[in-house]
Amino acid sequence: MLSKEKLQRISELAKKDTLTVDEKEEQQALRKEYLETFRSGMRNHIEGLKFVDPEGTDVTPEKLKQIQKEKGLHGR
């Protein structure tokens, strides 16, 4: 997760009408870091999911089960 300071800086730069070259570079770097952090967190969340149908049967896709097995998730 990005620090509170970095998130505030992203907001500050987004609100400005014009940015200097340095500010544009900073904005791009912060956005890149934000997206990498978001994607990583989302991937970890999804990889931890287990899908169960109404009858209680595990219907997690095999590809996801393999990833979970490799990472040692769900006791497999």
Image: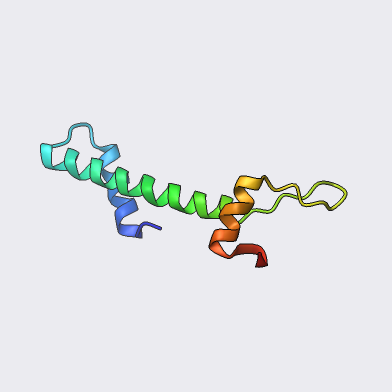
Taking the image as shown, residue 52 lies to the left or right of residue 50, namely: right
Q: Position of residue 51 (x, y in %)?
A: 72, 49
For this rendering, which residue is in front, 7 or 56? 56
The image quadrant that residue 74 belongs to is bottom right
Q: Residue at x 43, y 49 (%)?
A: 38
Q: Residue furthest top?
A: 17
Vertical comparison of 68 with 23: above or below: below
Q: Residue at x 77, y 50 (%)?
A: 52
For this rendering, which residue is in front, 75 or 48? 75
Q: Position of residue 48 (x, y in %)?
A: 60, 56
Q: How is the image coloured?
A: rainbow
The image quadrant that residue 61 belongs to is top right
Q: Residue furthest right?
A: 55
Q: Residue at x 60, y 59 (%)?
A: 69
Q: Residue at x 58, y 50 (%)?
A: 46
Vertical comparison of 57 with 71: above or below: above
Q: Position of residue 13 (x, y in %)?
A: 25, 42
Q: Position of residue 1 (x, y in %)?
A: 41, 58
Q: Residue furthest left?
A: 21
Taking the image as shown, residue 58 lies to the left or right of residue 16, namely: right
Q: Residue furthest bottom?
A: 75
Quadrant where the C terminus is found in the figure = bottom right
The total of numbered circles placed on residues is 0
